[in-house]
Amino acid sequence: MSSNNVASFNEARRVAIFGGTHGNEMSGVTLVNLWMMNSREEIQRKGVETQPFITNPKAVEKCSRYVDTDLNRAFTTENLSAPNGKDLPYEVQRAQEINRLFGPKGSSEAYDVIFDLHNTTSNMGCTLILESSKDHFNLQMMNYIKKAIAPDSCPVLLNEDPGLKYATARSVAKHSVGLEVGPQPQGVLRSNIFEAMRIILKHALDFIELFNEGVEFPPCTVDVFKVSERMDYPRDANGNIIAMVHPNLQDCDWEPLTPGDPMFQTFDGKTIPYEGAGAVYPTFINEAAYYEKQQAFVTTRRETLAANAIRKV
Ligand SMILES: CC(=O)N[C@@H](CC(=O)O)C(=O)O
Ligand SMILES: [Zn+2]
């Protein structure tokens, strides 16, 4: 194969692991705190400087998702360039600080890789979240992790549609990776979820070490679930929710939902079916944090992405 098809990237020397972007998602909070206190060897790799970091300490202290506004929506150009002052919402001030420490977003000084650790109340298992289908470094990393954890699986959620994506904390890095593990209630630590997150991170860091050592990764394909639509709960004229996620759909993240399948159940027991065109793969089903975002679940469609071979410059 011609060398034109090999994408080259600089070594990924500066890596950050964010926890507590949402202060009530306990796996990331606990792992990052652990790695900051001691156990640093666990995240050390040859030729890599890995920085564990609590992104929203005030929210962690309160064990709430955020204090003033969702930090994982705050990294907009507008916020990051706002004249800073004490009257800005706490999370906007924090976003500016994080952008100074790990960015600036979109610049050559930005960190190479940021992993952002999240938990969901949905039954999503170990999900990796990407924001671009064209980042061949990240696609190769996904392929490496999927192979490493087989026969267990880790779905890759692609959230790249400009109308659907949001301004995440991890987006300040050159390569941003979200890690979303569930089901775990807010404010709760479950050992299985904690360990699953830890293992994914181990493989991700191993990949970076191999890449920095000069290993060339051959072309591959990566199956992803691409976010396609946000689905709200059915509501009355006053905006009150009038139905719940249907029992047939509850906990069935990543399983096909086809037209006619039960989707919601009203309080008097009526079934509201899915009426879209063709099968979709719902996820973030009944996520607690998304009630305020008026979102019952998101639909995704399956795609296979091609990743070029990669090696370091
Ligand atoms: C439940 C949760 O917080 N999910 C994350 C997903 C992501 O990081 O993209 C969020 O809404 O920011
Ligand atoms: Zn979160």
Image (cartoon, rainbow, N blue to C red):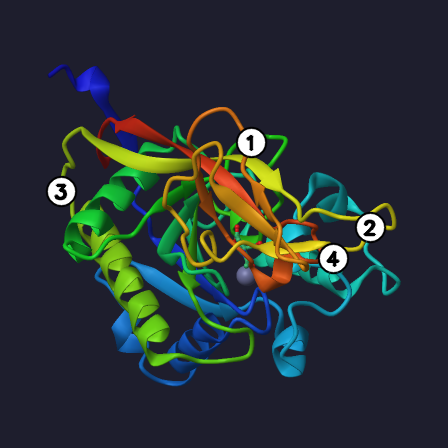
In the picture, which quadrant includes the C terminus? top left
Q: Tell me which label, 4 or 3, sits earlier in the chain.
A: 4
Q: Tell me which label, 2 or 3, sits earlier in the chain.
A: 3
Inter-mark Cα distance, 2 to 4: 29 Å
What residue does disc 2 label?
A: 239
Q: Tell me which label, 4 or 1, sits earlier in the chain.
A: 4
Residue at point 44%, 26% (across, down): 278
Q: Position of residue 131 (x, y in %)?
A: 47, 39
Q: Tell me which label, 2 or 4, sits earlier in the chain.
A: 4
What is the crowding at mark 3: few (fewer than 14 residues within 10 Å), some, or many (at least 20)? some
Q: Tell me: 312 left or right of 111.
A: left
What residue does disc 4 label?
A: 92
Q: Tell me which label, 1 or 3, sits earlier in the chain.
A: 3
What residue does disc 1 label?
A: 275
What residue does disc 3 label?
A: 215
Inter-mark Cα distance, 4 to 3: 39 Å
